[in-house]
């Protein structure tokens, strides 16, 4: 299999030269797009959308039809993995994700096992295959998973949380129980990402949304160590092409050197760090992905363009090693026109910087 016609994203991750800085946006297929809302309505609800390969494929392609983006990301959710582990995922309308059976009892934790990715998450693999066929080698497809710690946050809390008191209580009281959850989940994520790669994902990303809520010591022990184990277990090549891996810890700015050292190809940055400073800290070890504040997209188009140029200027000279993105997912309230201004600014200004 050859690389996609537009392989700028893969080349930037592998630190090969590119003519401009590629970009995609976290949550690029989402509620800010009216066509997404229309398809979601047709599906009935968000989970049905995730579980229908044809509809997941349809919404994956929607942002690419509107904007000149350099990668597609599988439409799914990180919580499909704990759902496949039997926790009973549902979305209470307007309230975010919930589990019917949060994981708190020792017996339940001892009974936890990694699901078979093809048997229990076959709909995701089918979506990956269908999206690859629909993309027809135009741009690469990114597969993804949550980090074990981030998944455990939802599994133990049973829903989103502002204080994480259940999981942190467990972390300090019964670290053995939390390690057991993280270990089983790390095995599940490794096989899940490898199945996505086997089904056609051309790069993978690990979303560690809540690792940044941990203490300095706990981050290494309860989040980073398990991501390191996953990265070590990933299939590195498919059909002769390297499959790059991106690791993103939101609020992980204090630990960039440590993240860069776990064997990933790229580190995702949220908007709280200066990307030029981040580049000096990680050196040549990895590429960087990020890191515009998603709320910039609420400003006027010329401000959006100016703020995007600031990120590119801060990254500095060179013709590779940067994938432009937001520092976190795009808000559902974003005006779609802001994204047009962003894409033009990133492609246009980064071409000028290479002259
Ligand atoms: O980036 C993409 O376009 C791919 C799709 C994707 C979704 N969720 C779709 C989604 C990805 C990569 C995710 C990851 C995800 N899901 C994370 C990690 C990244 C992050 O945002 O921090 C987390 C923590 C989740 C869990 C989750 N899923 C939450 C907390 C919510 C509710 C938040 C909200 O915006 O309502 C979801 C739902 C969800 N996942 C939506 C989308 C498009 C909105 C659902 C809808 O259409 O109602």
Image (tube, helix red, strand yellow):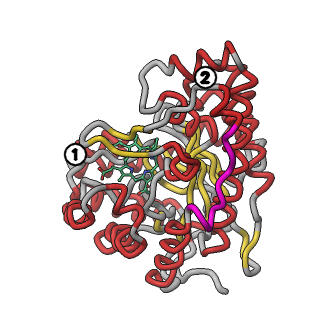
State whether residue 165 is above or below residue 285. Answer: above
| Segment colored magenta | 111-120
Where is 211 relative to 123, above or below?
A: above
Check residue 118 for magenta coloring: yes
Q: Position of residue 306 (x, y in %)?
A: 33, 47
Residue furthest front in the image = 107
Label 1: element kind: loop
Q: Which mark is residue 214?
A: 2
Query: Which residue is identified by label 1?
Result: 333
**Considering the image in quadrants, where does the N terminus appear?**
bottom right
Mark 1 or mark 2, which is nearer to you?
2
- Disc 1 versus disc 2: distance between alpha carbons? 29 Å
The first of marks 1 and 2 along the sequence is 2
Q: Residue at 56% across / 46% down in the picture? A: 146
User: Which residue is rendered at x = 42% and y = 33% of the image?
Assistant: 159
Does 304 lie within the magenta span? no
Kindly tell me whether residue 100 is visible in this rendering: yes
From the viewer's perspective, is residue 257 above or below residue 18?
above
């Amino acid at each position: 299999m050859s690389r996609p016609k537009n392989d700028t994203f893969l080349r930037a991750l592998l630190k090969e030269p590119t003519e401009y800085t590629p970009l995609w946006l976290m949550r690029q297929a989402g509620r800010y797009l009216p066509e997404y809302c229309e398809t979601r309505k047709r599906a009935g609800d968000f989970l049905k959308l995730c579980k229908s390969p044809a509809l997941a494929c349809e919404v994956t392609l929607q942002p690419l039809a509107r904007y000149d983006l350099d990668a597609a990301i599988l439409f799914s959710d990180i919580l499909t993995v704990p759902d496949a582990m039997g926790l009973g995922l549902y979305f209470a309308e307007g309230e975010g994700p919930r589990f019917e059976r949060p994981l708190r009892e020792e017996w339940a934790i001892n009974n936890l096992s990694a699901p078979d990715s093809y048997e229990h998450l076959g709909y995701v693999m089918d979506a990956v295959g269908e999206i690859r066929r629909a993309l027809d080698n135009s741009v690469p497809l990114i597969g993804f998973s949550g980090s074990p710690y981030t998944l455990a946050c939802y599994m133990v809390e049973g829903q989103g949380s502002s204080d994480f008191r259940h999981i942190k209580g467990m972390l300090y009281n019964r670290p053995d129980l939390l390690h057991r959850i993280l270990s089983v989940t790390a095995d599940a994520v490794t096989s899940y990402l490898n199945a996505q790669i086997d089904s056609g994902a051309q790069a993978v990303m690990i979303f560690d949304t809540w690792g940044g809520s941990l203490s300095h010591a706990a981050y290494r022990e309860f989040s980073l160590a398990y991501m390191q184990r996953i990265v070590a277990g990933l299939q590195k090549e498919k059909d002769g092409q390297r499959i790059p891996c991106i690791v993103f810890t939101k609020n992980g700015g204090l630990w960039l050197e440590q993240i860069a050292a776990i064997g990933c190809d790229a580190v995702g940055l949220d908007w709280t760090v200066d990307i030029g400073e981040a580049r000096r800290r990680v050196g040549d070890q990895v590429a960087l992905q990020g890191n515009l504040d998603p709320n910039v997209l609420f400003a006027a188009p010329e401000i959006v363009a100016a703020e995007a140029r600031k990120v590119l200027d801060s990254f500095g000279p060179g013709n590779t090693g940067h994938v432009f993105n937001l520092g976190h997912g795009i808000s559902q309230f974003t005006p779609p026109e802001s994204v047009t201004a962003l894409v033009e600014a990133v492609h246009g200004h980064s071409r000028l910087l290479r002259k």
